[in-house]
Amino acid sequence: MASVAGILLTWLLLKLYGPARTRSLYASGALLIVSLAITLISAEYIVRYSFRDITTTRDNNSYFARTWLAAHPPRKNSHGFREREFSIEKPENIYRIAVIGDSFTFGQGIEEKDRFSNLLEHRLNRSQGRYQVLNFGKAGTNTAEEVNILKHQVLDTSPDYILLQWYINDGEGRDSKKKRPWALLPSHFLTSYLHERSALFYMLNSHWQHLQVSLGLIKKYDDYVMERFGDPDSAPSQAAASALEEFFRIAKAHNIPVGVVMFPRLIDARGSINNYGLGFLIDHAMVVCRQHGVSCLDLRPIFADVSPATKLWANRLDPHPGPLANRMVCETILKDFKQGWVKNDAQQTHAPVRTADPAYRKP
């Protein structure tokens, strides 16, 4: 088809302009194509060099994330988590803490040793190695999916405590009606191909998506969330609350204490938690925690004074919690939860074997 089109174009140009003019036009076109190719290739390598510090981005399919993950593949154990191998049966004299969450727990964009779960185990075991903190984080999960992880994988490990990491998008679920930005290119294949292989395309496409929001071509994320979850009695809000309540009920049925660590978006709050966008989602979740007597840690106060908030990020293109944020989370968790862990650990050897509530039946 391309050959036929080329022949037809040449014939038309010869008819209109003659041989000399046609050769000149083709020479100019070839020069333009070569110049454009050189410009794009140069721009590609300039962007790669300028952003050589980038590890991951918001998604793991981008050029930056794929390049970094290829050089630093996260280990996966036989249970499918980014965690060392461990026995399902809990060793004697060990207090086992299971941390369940999404990409924040998984450790998007950071080394395994820098995650708050790893830091917690290290700090708890400074005096004696009696604590085991297991990471059950999976990128992209929501509360309903974390309920399944709890039921089908975590309970079998006999944890003494379950720590749920919660983020403001955990109640969204898989909303197929959410409007996506217009693509920069008309071809889905070409868009996906360049997204995975070009740093320049990733940056251009990101700016194009932000431009659509600023021009009002697509709804702002905050407006979308407010529309669905602003009313705590709306169907989406109730579904989000129900998923959290189910998580608590399952843990209670197995006599396992549970706590929640609630992350806000890592944005500049200028010293006040009232400046956090979508903070009402945390407030709604805190209500569910209080109703079920669950200890919930709101991280907004500890992050509010950090400016610029990008200090908390994995890198300047990835707003997932970086090493600093994870260290701050670890310290705050220890202040709020450690006393209960130490007390329960001390009582373990005198406590009866924990059994599930007979009214609960694992599916």
Image (tube, rainbow, N blue to C red):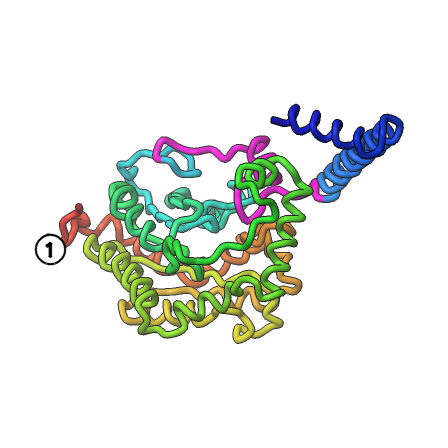
Residue wearing tag 1: 359
* Relative horizontal placement of residue 70, taking residue 225 as reference (left or right): right
The correct choice, above or below, for 237 with respect to 6 in the image is below
Find the magenta span and give its range: 51-79
Q: Nearer the viewer, residue 181 or 199?
A: 181
Element carrying mark 1:
loop
- Residue found 37% across the figure and 49% down from its top: 100
Q: Nearer the viewer, residue 59 or 329?
A: 59
Percent across and percent down for residue 294 are: 31, 65
Percent across and percent down for residue 230 are: 41, 73
Residue 334 part of the magenta segment: no
- Residue found 44% across the figure and 46% down from its top: 139
- Residue found 33% across the figure and 46% down from its top: 96
Residue 52 part of the magenta segment: yes
- Placement of the N terminus among the 4 image quadrants: top right
Percent across and percent down for residue 14 are: 80, 29
Residue 106 visible: yes
Point out the residue furthest to the front here: 15
Residue 164 visible: no
